[in-house]
Image (cartoon, rainbow, N blue to C red):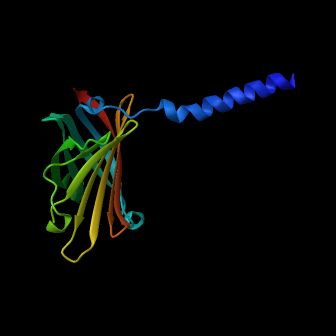
Amino acid sequence: MKTGLRFIAALCLMVVLAQPSLARDLRIDAFYGLFKGTGVAENKDSIYFGVTVRDFDVSVRPADEGFEVEWTTVIRRGGNPNNPKVKRKGQKFTFLPTGKGGIYRSPTSADPMSGVPYAWARIKKNTLNVYLFTITASGAFSLQTYARTLTPLGMDFVFTRLRDGEPVRSVKGKLIKYAK
């Protein structure tokens, strides 16, 4: 009886230890498509001033030898609740393979001290991470990260922005795939 229990325990342990090796990084084409959704932005003052709701469009498609990510964020805040102030922000980056599996670099990345972001991307398991790094005129750094994780219904989205290592803002959302 004890031998049978030990065998089952050892088998369970082997299955648990083998799990990380089964989870492989997806290929970039798994992320191709048009995704739309909504999220909530928070910062350190959200406890006093509340959170803001944002709408997102994200497009990931092949480009050159790599891929292109384009996104738009719509922010509604302030003003009349029936007619809030609307701010629209968009960005677009092309990424090419670096030769290091799952890591890509934007060919337009400049010296981070120029004010133009140094942009790179990587795929880890089922998440496409995009990073934008800049250094301000005063020498402070800003790091924006966009984690887009594929789910059965579409994509989970987490944005974080750090300034000199301190959190400035985070946004979490869910997006649904609308088109390939």
Q: Is residue 109 above or below residue 11?
A: below
- Between 168 and 52, the residue placed more toward the observer is 168
Q: Is residue 82 visible?
A: no
- Depth check, front residue: 10 or 170: 10
Location of the N terminus (image quadrant):
top right
Q: Left or right: 119 with respect to 12?
A: left
Give how far across and how far down residue 21 sits, in percent: 50, 33
- Determine the residue located farthest toward the right in the rendered image: 1
* Quadrant of the rendered image containing residue 153: top left
x then y, percent, for residue 129: 32, 46
Quadrant location of the C terminus in the rendered image: top left
Q: Is residue 79 visible?
A: yes
The residue positioned 76% from the left and 25% from the top of the image is 7
The residue lying furthest to the front in this view is 99
- Which residue sits at x=27%, y=73%? 140
| Residue 14 rendering spot, x and y as whole percentages | 64, 30
- Of residue 107 and residue 67, the one placed in the foreground of this image is 107
Residue occupying the point 35% across, 56% down: 170
